Image (cartoon, rainbow, N blue to C red):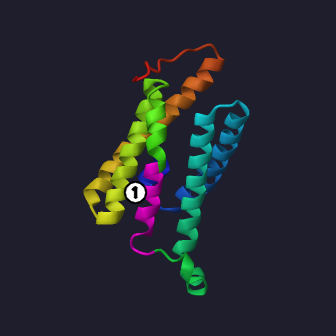
Amino acid sequence: TFVLQMHNLGYCGLAPVIWLGLCFGGTAQLVAGLMEFKKNNNFGFCAFTGYGAFWISLCLMLLFGKNAELVQSYPLLKFSEVDLGMYLVAWTIFTVPLFIASMRHHSALALTFFTLLLGFIGLDLKELTGNAAAGTFAAYDLLVCASLALYLMTVSIFAESGIKLPVGKPWF
């Protein structure tokens, strides 16, 4: 998420987004989701496998949908003007129940999903209406989201070492 937003803000190209999206954002999250499934953590299973699939499918869309040679041979792969926007709307909808459920866990998780939801809405507006300001807002918001996700990872890793970091109370 961090590197994608660096790309969206113009600080790096698309290549690191593709590689990280396929390997870390996609594959690692799918594995994490399957591990959560074994622990009977449906929230973690849904979130990790869902967003792992998001990253893999986004990267494949970008790789194949913008490849002129492939698109010429397989025109169904070509992006229309609204395809990425509608793809993102689907993920916005997917994020809503996870955000609602996250509010019953703790503040750090709820804030992570809140910023993720706001980021998706901003990206939806950017892609479907051409509103560049919404895209810029989404990029900065999703940098906050990436920071919160890193904090949650740190909370989990530190807990195994007996270091307890604050996560806040559930919102309801």
**Residue lying at 53% horizontally and 56% vertically, measured from the top left:** 17
Q: Residue furthest right?
A: 38
Q: Is residue 48 above or below residue 63?
A: above
Q: Does the segment drawn in magenta span residue 34? A: no
- Residue underneath mark 1: 8
Residue 11: quadrant of the picture: bottom left
Q: Residues within 10 Å of mark 1 (few under 14, many from 20)?
A: some
**Residue lying at 51% horizontally and 74% vertically, measured from the top left:** 66
Q: Is residue 126 above or below residue 148?
A: below
Q: Is residue 77 visible?
A: yes
The residue closer to the viewer here, 28 or 171, is 171
Number of numbered callouts drawn: 1
Task: Assign the magenta stretch its main secondary structure.
Answer: helix
Q: Is residue 135 above or below residue 84?
A: above
Amino acid type assigned to the residue bearing label 1 in the image = Asn
Place of residue 35 in the rendered image (x, y in percent of width and height, measured from the top left): 71, 36
The residue closer to the viewer here, 122 or 69, is 122
Place of residue 132 in the rendered image (x, y in percent of width and height, measured from the top left): 28, 60
The C terminus is located in which quarter? top left
Place of residue 22 in the rendered image (x, y in percent of width and height, measured from the top left): 62, 55
**Residue lying at 56% horizontally and 76% vertically, measured from the top left:** 77
Q: Residue furthest bottom?
A: 72
Q: Secondary structure at mark 1?
A: helix
Q: Which residues are magenta?
A: 80-93
Q: Is residue 144 visible?
A: no
> Horizontally, is 127 left or right of 33 in the view?
left
Place of residue 61 in the rendered image (x, y in percent of width and height, measured from the top left): 55, 67
**Residue lying at 60% horizontally and 81% vertically, measured from the top left:** 70
